[in-house]
Structure formats: structure tokens, C-alpha cells
Image (cartoon, rainbow, N blue to C red):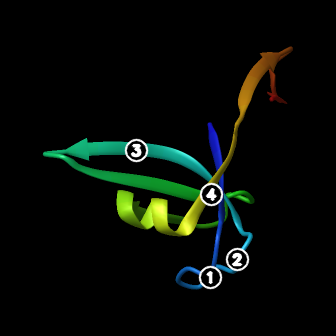
Amino acid sequence: MKLYTLKKQFNEYKKGTQFYLIAESEFIGVKEFVLRTKDLSKSISINESELLKNFIFIKEIFFIETKGTLEEND
């Protein structure tokens, strides 16, 4: 899972808000991305130009399952 942060205010979200990229799709050359806030309370759907203009890639996060629970492994 990829983690992004806002470069500047976007819609009602403040600069520095962190988002997980949860889905990306492409149809006839148009890319769309679904991001969810780090606390998982809200999600937004944006196109590629909005992603590149307003967000900074932070890191890729991997989750591993151990004894029935998920743990973060960067």
C-alpha cells in the first residue's frame, strides 16, 4: 500500500494530511485513483493530474500477517 501526503490544501483537506492509495484504474488512457485518509474515515477519487499536482509519495507500506493479526513492515 502506498502512502501519500498533501502538498497544499485540497478540497476540505489540510496540507500534510496523509492518505493511503487503495485503488487505481485506467480506462482508455484515463487513470483514476482512490485515496483514503490515514484514519480511514474518508475517501476521495481523483485523476492522475490531481494526484501529481497535489500529493507527494511518502513510502510503500507492507503488511504481514502474524498469528491472525496484521502488522506494518516498512
Q: Residues within 10 Å of mark 2 (few under 14, many from 20)?
A: some
Q: Is residue 30 above or below residue 6?
A: above
Question: What is the CA distance from the residue labelled 1 to the residue labelled 4?
Answer: 13 Å
User: Is the residue under label 4 in contact with that under label 3 (CB below 8 Å)?
Assistant: no
Which labelled disc corresponds to residue 9? 1
Which badge, 3 or 4, is on the more N-terminal residue? Answer: 3
How many residues crowd mark 4 within 10 Å: few (<14), some (14–19), many (20+)? some
Amino acid on which disc 4 is placed: Ile
Mark 3–mark 1 Cα distance, whole angstroms, equals: 22 Å
Q: Are marks 1 and 2 in contact (CB under 8 Å)?
A: yes
Find out whether the residues at labels 3 and 1 contact each other: C-beta distance under 8 Å.
no
Q: Amino acid at mark 3?
A: Glu
Q: Nearer the viewer, residue 67 or 29?
A: 29
Q: Nearer the viewer, residue 1 or 40?
A: 1
Mark 2: which amino acid? Answer: Lys
> Residue 56's mark?
4
Q: Which mark is residue 15?
A: 2
Q: Disc 3 designates what residue? A: 24
